[in-house]
Amino acid sequence: MGILQIVIVIAILVLLVKPAGSYLYHVFSNEPNRTDRIFGGLERGIFRLGGLSKREDMSWKRYAVSFLTTNIVLVAFGYLILRLQGALPLNPGGIGKMEQTLAFNTVISFITNTNLQHYSGETGVSYFSQMAVMTMLMFTSAAGGFSVAVAFVRGITGRKSLGNFFEDFVKAHTRVFIPLALLVTLLLIGLQVPQTLKPTLEVTTLEGQTQQIAVGPVASLESIKHIGTNGGGFFGANSAHPFENPSPLTNVIEILSMWLLPASLPYMYGRFARNKRQGWMIFSAMMTLFVLLLGLNFYAESQGNPAINAMGIDASQGSMEGKEVRFGIAQSALFTTVTTAATTGSVNNMHDTLTPLGEITPLALMMLNNVFGGKGVGLINMLMYAILGVFLCGLMVGRTPEFLGRKIEAREMKLIAIAILIHPLIILVPTAGAFLTDLGQGSISNPGFHGLTQVLYEYTSSAANNGSGFEGLADNTSFWNMTTGVVMLLGRYVSIIAMLAVAGSMIRKKAVPETIGTFRTDNGLFTGILIGTVLIIGALTFLPVIVLGPVAEYLTLR
Amino acid sequence: MRRVGNDHIVIQEQNHEHGHVSKASFIFSVIRLSAIFIIICGIAYPLASTAIAQTFMPSRANGSLLKNSAGQVVGSELIGQSFTNPALFHGRVSSIEYNAAGSGSNNYGPSNPDMLQRTSDSINQWKTDNPDVPVTELPADLITNSGSGLDPHISPAAAAVQIPRISNLTGIPAEQLEALVAEYTEGRDLGLFGEKRVNVLKLNMALLEK
């Protein structure tokens, strides 16, 4: 039953990829289509109010500047609200202003679509902040990232321009995120996720004690949290909390919500490239890596914790520490794999409590950062590896490498090298740094090799803009707030700017005609090369630290 | 195509003539656009969702509260409670003692000595309280901390192993308790997703009615 329910969720996803990918193509190809009639009026209104009636094509620099400026304005607004929340309306819990470094970390975390949370939702933020800061940034950061991905695809597929950031940004909201979020919100409320402005409830339990129960506008945050691959929970326990994720059915809805858009982007890319096979090849490379890592986590968690099994209990349920009974191993393993593949970062079981081999799955997916990936960044990263793969093959046979009929030259390779190398740099250097300081070491809550994994996980999650955590780490200190804040910023913006620059340079190149000697990027051989490139680069950079953390812990527990 | 091209030229000329004016208007545009989405996504959307929820699905939207036969609210169907009375069914370990003002757990890693100590203490306590059931039948969910600290469920096996204890203390025959557990066992969603489970609060409410 465990494997069957996983296979069925994957099958539903695969069936949805083509319709969703086609829809995204229609929205962003900017050719007239039926959706204009539904959304056109609203969009014209927004453009008029925003003073954007003229929307000329943008150069890559102008696109990047527009994206960055919008993010700066939104982040400034968010910071102000968090600092002033004590004096603002919709604060029935009487929650005071957020501390400076925590507010810094929080707004960066949400604008970079990371949603690492060093605060706890029940006690740290008012309902107004949950709505106007968290929920709002969940939309805008996802729409911004989506726009960049679309511009990148236009660039490398040789469309006439990268497009206009504001047009993409508005359409991503009106035609994708807002309608989907409303639909999923209503589904979740129907399945018992609360949506109320009432304050925390107080009840007398069956045994006569007083129990407080935090509620709030949960469903409207929960839906966009997954659709926008954000992952920041309304409550501290995130999607393990029965109010955020009451049943296996809501669990499946949340899994599909966060997986659908990232998984449809390769298909959309195939449509842009006028060769759907290109898209399916990227998709199958992603799915292969996904299934391998899902299998590892499912197997490891089903085996249970050897140290507990040795105490002689019935171990047939697997490792249940940090998991919920309604989800069991299958729904927990699938959620963990999807949330770290799609860089969402919500959790329905506590990753800190995973078995040593089970921990490798979320870590590896965030280290690779290109298996589906959130809000378009995963597709960008995978295409970056595809270009690298073509380049390596070109070197081996001594030809100028080409990708989609355009020559790959020194400038593109330099930019891609920067984007690939920044990721391990901002994970491994801060991890090593944290171990050199008492400020970093003092926050570790689990002794031994697991403690190393806690620190490694925190920076990996920040760099990949994922946001899940080994939550035992006492991370609400100035040290962690500042360092992870900087890592999240670098993780988001360096690769986005480098990739927009690649797109800007590819779009100017003349297409070279395809000949018999052209290296094809739409067949199984290339999928194999792509998976190989990803795994070799990933293993070269991260294998040593994986051995020091999870593998060493596995060997001591066995 | 031609219109786009013309616009482009016009804008370039404007940029040339009033460079800083267009920069200011660019930033002003960004601020206006941001304000629009702050209002739509941050205020209108959550408030509209709340209005729909409160109009059409008020009980689901307000925390799925449960009432006893006297009409008093005794908790939420979705939020677990702490049970210490040995004559009632017990739920899972919760480091926050089911205080739903917060949520979460200690996040103990699999090799954490505190976690291993806590688990072995729970097993010893279990042996004392349930001498009739061999420890090899004790399911893992009863001695582990849930992720939320608020898990309202236990597995059917975890309910079954508590029946001898409760039967001894209450005098209710084991067969009746087995029937009660079977009645309160929820299947997989759509017969497929998730695990079979028993809601401890609902089960205990029914037990107290007996």
Image: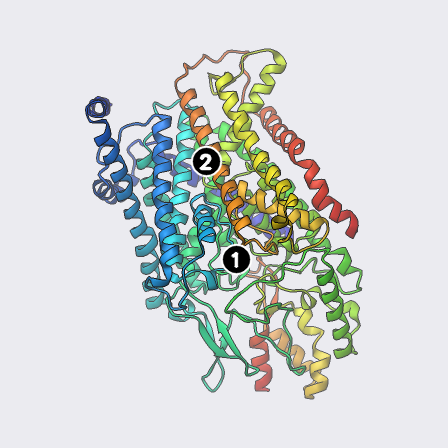
Q: Earlier in the sequence, mark 2 or mark 1?
A: 1
In the rendered image, is residue A522 in sight?
A: no
Locate residue A382, reporting x and y percent: 53, 32
Residue A239 marker:
1
Residue type at numbered disc 1: Ser
Q: Is residue B126 above or below residue A218?
A: below
Locate residue A487, reporting x and y percent: 52, 41
Q: Chain of mark 2?
A: A
Locate residue A504, reporting x and y percent: 40, 23
Residue A493 marker:
2
Q: Quadrant of the N terminus of chain B?
A: top left
Classify residue A503 by image quadrant.
Answer: top left
Residue depicted at 64% across the width and 77% down the height: B89
Horizontal side, residue A20 vs residue B185: left or right:
left
Q: Chain of mark 1?
A: A
Locate residue A310, reporting x and y percent: 80, 60
Residue A128 marker:
none
Indicate which label's residue lies in the foreground, 2 or 1.
Answer: 2
Residue type at numbered disc 2: Tyr
Q: Are marks 2 and 1 on the same chain?
A: yes
Provide the secondary structure element on which disc 2 rests: helix
Provide the secondary structure element on which disc 1 rests: helix
Residue toward you, A523 or A489: A489
